[in-house]
Image (cartoon, coloured by chain):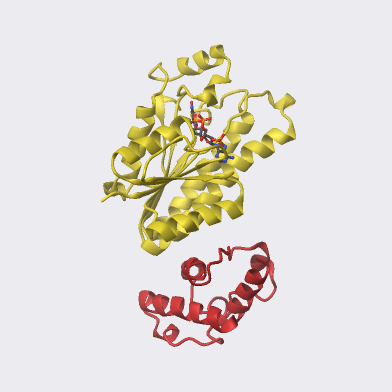
Chain colours: A yellow, B red
Amino acid sequence: MGRVFVITGSGKGIGREMALHYLAQGNVVAGCSRGEPSIVDKNYTHFQLDVADEKAVVAMVRTVRKSHGVIDVLLNNAGIAAMNHLATTPMQTLQKVFATNVFGSFIFLREVAKVMMRAKTGRIVNFSTVAVPLRLEGETVYGASKAAIEHLTRVAARELGSSGITVNAVGPAPVDTDLVRSVPPEKIDALIARQAVRRFGTFADVIQVVDFFIDPRSSFVTGQVLYLGGAG
Amino acid sequence: MKEKILSIIYAALNDASEELGKPELARPGPETHLYGRKGHLDSLALVNLLADVEQRVADDLGKAIVLADERAMSQKRSPFATAGTLADYIELLLSEG
Ligand SMILES: NC(=O)c1ccc[n+]([C@@H]2O[C@H](COP(=O)([O-])OP(=O)(O)OC[C@H]3O[C@@H](n4cnc5c(N)ncnc54)[C@H](OP(=O)(O)O)[C@@H]3O)[C@@H](O)[C@H]2O)c1
């Protein structure tokens, strides 16, 4: 029998590919993004919302639980980036990046954890980035928001461990999506040069890590952050 | 409404009583102590109870509430002290829509 997934930011990029992958395996997926759905599948439901909108997220999680009884997996993927020197970073950038990356991840973590706590089992994967261990210049705000997510991951793993819920994070190296297309190519090249394996990451690379974290046999793996490409 | 909310809390306490092996929670009333000085629940058990109550409120009353409200954490008299104070607090949240 398939499992019930909640995948945030499933409109495009990594989130969309993960949704398609888990749907193809016969799972049920509830996804969300601010934009229109880009997946048509009888086992897919799209919620058009902003992950930082607490009321909308509470309503979505409640709807998913009512329809399926449980939520087995949360992939907290929705995220936005910002490239800027700190000296020229406006306050609005901080507010936007933290609202989506930190507040959004937290609200989903909290709401889904409550459903999983009743079931005494669950798998949660958050999304960091290699920009954290590489201390990438020009990404202070984005990196800080992802560092916050790493801390949420480690502490949540402890708070939820006794409820049978694991919480881990994957830190992708650059994957060719809209998120990195706005970054100047020479910056990306310099970043890739700092990896142990010097190439772009693929969707399959990310899914490989997620598959491992959400495997029912990975019940002893929690509070970990795994970076791709040998960065960090 | 208060009675309906209390019955939801009692149902959740019944489950908790079994799970925690605490028979004193099996026949709860408005005065049953939950959390605090005389409380029957430790912080983790309280968190589990609140998650359970939220979901029962959503199922039985069709309303999504979040009990982790700023006020709940800062009120002098904690709304989580007894089943009765928790019911009052939920009634307040529901009245705010
Ligand atoms: N691509 C990379 O190289 C890379 C590297 C490291 C880490 N990551 C992380 O991987 C995750 C996915 O990145 P990606 O490359 O797939 O990005 P992407 O192609 O830009 O897709 C992001 C998805 O998130 C949604 N989203 C963004 N803000 C949202 C909000 N406030 N509320 C709801 N949905 C929102 C977007 O849809 P809408 O715009 O319609 O809302 C979109 O569906 C992010 O957390 C990112 O930080 C990516």
Of A166 and A4, the residue lying toward us? A4
Residue A102 position within the rendered picture, expressed as x and y whole percent measured from the top left: 58, 43
**Picture layout, residue B57 above or below residue A192:** below
Of A182 and A131, the residue lying toward us? A182
Residue B74 position within the rendered picture, expressed as x and y whole percent measured from the top left: 68, 67
How many numbered circles does the render carry? 0
Residue A222 position within the rendered picture, expressed as x and y whole percent measured from the top left: 38, 47
Q: In this view, does A96 lie to the left or right of A114?
A: right
Residue A108 position within the rendered picture, expressed as x and y whole percent measured from the top left: 51, 50
**Picture layout, residue B52 above or below residue A224:** below
Residue B38 visible in rendering: no
Q: Is residue A150 left or right of residue A97?
A: left
Q: Quadrant of the C terminus of chain A?
A: top left
Q: In which quarter of the image is residue B73?
A: bottom right
Extreme residue toward the top, this view: A186
Residue sitting at x 36%, y 46%: A43
Of A40 and B82, the residue lying toward us? A40
Residue B84 visible in rendering: yes
Residue sitting at x 63%, y 70%: B94
Residue sitting at x 55%, y 78%: B5
Q: Is residue A22 left or right of residue A10?
A: left
**Picture layout, residue A187 above or below residue A230:** above
